[in-house]
Amino acid sequence: MIATINPRVARLSIVVFCLLGLTFGLLYAYRDSPTATRLLKTIPIINDNNSPSSNQPADDNKPPLPGSQPPKYKPPPKNPPPPITDPFPLLATTSKDVLPPPIPAYNIPHPDLHLHYGLSRPPPLFIGFTRQWPMLLQAVVSYITAGWPASGIYVVENTGVHNSNRAGLLSLQNPFFLNHTTLKRLGVNVIQTPVLLNFAQMQNFFLDVAYQEDHKYYFYSHQDVLVFSFEDGPDQERRPGDREWEVYDEEDKKATVTNPPAAGEEGYMTIYENCLREINTTVARGERWGFRWFQYDHLTLVNRAALEAVGGWDSMIPYYATDCDMNGKLAMDGWTMKHRRAGIVNDVSSVMTDLEALYRNPAVVPGFVDPNPLPPDQEESIKERGKWKVKKVSGDSNTTTMPTDPKAYFRILNQVGIDMGAYKYRDGDRQRNRWQKSQQGGLGEPYHYDPEGFARAFQLLTEAGRRIYSEKWGHQGCDIAEKTQLKLQDQWRVEGDFE
Ligand SMILES: *[C@@H]1O[C@H](CO)[C@@H](O)[C@H](O)[C@H]1NC(C)=O
Ligand SMILES: *[C@@H]1O[C@H](CO)[C@@H](O)[C@H](O)[C@H]1NC(C)=O
Ligand SMILES: *[C@@H]1O[C@H](CO)[C@@H](O)[C@H](O)[C@H]1NC(C)=O
C-alpha cells in the first residue's frame, strides 16, 4: 500500500496538534486554578494506563509514596460456600437440539387459553434476575412444568455484565452467571436491562416494557420460588409466606381455596389458567385495583394504570421498604391490593438436586440442597428453636424408582416443596437470604464485582432506603396507609412523627 498524505489532512493535523499542545500547556501553567482543575477532570486522557478504568493490574513494584499506608486486608470469609453444580444436568450436558422433557399432559396450556378469558394476547410474566442461576432456573422450570407457557415468561437479566452472558463469557461460579442457551432451549424469553438496576428501578423497567409492548396487566415473580398447580386438588398446607386468602363468594372459595378440582378432574385449572381467570374476574368486578398477590408479592398481578396513577416505584428507595412505599401510595389513592390464591407458591432458598424431577422422571428422586449451608454447629442450634420443621432435607431415601403416574409423583414433589419452604424459614427471617451469597467465583471475568462487596453494598443501600422512606413520609414502619392520615400529595412535605 502506498502511503499518501493529503496536504489538507496534514495541515489540519498540525493545527489540532498545536491546539492540544496549547491547551495542555495552559492547563499546566494554571494547573492550580479552579478552572484548570475542572478542565483536567473532564478532558479524557488518551492512553493513560494508570486510570482506574484501565484493565491493567496496578504496578506492584512502584515504591510507596512517603506517608502512605499499606492496606489492611480483611480476613478471608469464614465458611465459604461450596462450588455450585448446574441443577439441570440434562440440559447442561446435552447439545442444543435436545429438547427438554415433556411436562405432565394435564398441565400443557392450550395456546388460546387467554382468548377464553377475554384477553387478546397472553399477559407477560416477568422474572427479574441479578444473582444465582440455579434458583432462577428452578423457578422458571417450575412455572413451565406447572403449566405456564414458556413463551409467556420473560426473564429480565439485570446483572450489569452487559453482553457477557449472551456471549457465554462467565463461568458457573460467577454469581451473575446466566445461560441464555438453556433458557432459549426451554422456550423462555430473555430481556436484558441496559445497566444494573435496583429493585425499584427493575419494577419500573417491567412497567416500561408493559408500555412498550402495550400490556395493561402483567405478572411478575421473584426468582426464589418453586410453584405448582393444584394437581392433587385441595391443598391445606400453611406455608411460611401464606396470608389469609380473600375470596369473593362460595363458588370462588371452592375453586381457589377449599376444593379446587385435581388434575384429571372436571374443572381442573393450572396456576396459569387461574392467573388468567384472575384478570378476567378482577376486571369484571370493576374495582379500582392495583395488585393481586398470590403469596404476597412472590407472584403478583399488576394493573399498569394503578402504578401510573401513583407515580410508579420510588427509585430512591432501592430495595426493602420500596414495597411499603408503593403499597402505601396505592392504598392512599384507593387502589385495592388483595391476597388471592391461584396455585401453590413455595418461597425457597435451596435448590432441587435435579430439576428433571419437576418433569416427573421416575428415575429421579426429588431432593434439595442448600447452596450456602451453615456450619454444622449453627445448624444444630437452629433445630432446637426453629418454628418451621423440615421433615427431610435431601432425597437420600432408599427408593430408587419413583411413581410413573405424574400425579402420584406430584404428592412426593409437593412435600419436597413444603420442606424447602420450611427450611428457608427454619430460623425465622435470619437465614432466608443466605442463598444470595452462594456463588463467589468469577474473578477476572468481564464486569467482575466482588461478591462479598456486592452483598454488603446491597445491605447499605437497603438501610439508606429505609431512612429515605421514613423521611419521605415522616413515619417509620410499613403501615403508612393504616396508621397515619397521610395522602399521596404529602410525600416529602411532612415532619417526622418519630424521634
Ligand atoms: C371473561 O371471560 C368471559 C369468557 O370466559 C368473557 O365472555 C368475558 O368477556 C371476560 N370478561 C372480561 C372482563 O374480560
Ligand atoms: C450453557 O448451556 C449449554 C447447554 O444448554 C452449554 O452447552 C453451554 O456450555 C452453557 N454455557 C456456558 C457459558 O456455560
Ligand atoms: C437404606 O438402606 C441401608 C442399607 O441397605 C440401611 O442401613 C438404611 O437404614 C436405609 N435407609 C432408609 C432411610 O431406609
Image (cartoon, helix red, strand yellow):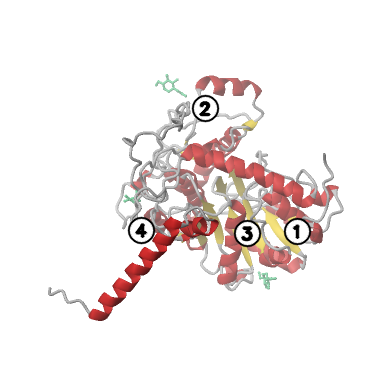
Compared across the picture, whether 26 is left or right of 33 comes to left
Question: Residue 101: image x %, image y %?
Answer: 40, 52
The C terminus sits in image quarter? top right
Q: Is residue 379 above or below residue 151?
A: above
**SS for dot 3:** helix
Q: Earlier in the sequence, mark 2 or mark 3?
A: 3
Q: Earlier in the sequence, mark 3 or mark 1?
A: 3
Disc 2 marks which residue?
374
Q: Nearer the viewer, residue 300 or 232?
A: 300
The N terminus sits in image quarter? bottom left
Residue 275 tag number: 3
Amino acid type at circle 1 is Leu
Residue 330 tag number: 1
Alpha carbons under labels 2 and 3: distance apart: 37 Å
Amino acid type at circle 2 is Leu
Alpha carbons under labels 4 and 2: distance apart: 49 Å
**Toward which corner of the image does residue 363 lie, by quadrant?**
top left
Question: Residue 278: image x %, image y %?
Answer: 67, 61
The answer, for residue 269, to whether it is visible in the render is: no
**SS for dot 1:** helix
* Ligand 1 visible in quadrant: bottom right
**Toward which corner of the image does residue 425 lie, by quadrant?**
top right
Residue at 54%, 35% (x, y): give it. Answer: 434
Q: Earlier in the sequence, mark 4 or mark 2?
A: 4
Check the image and name the residue furthest to the front.
29
Amino acid type at circle 3 is Cys
Between disc 4 and disc 1, the foreground one is: 4
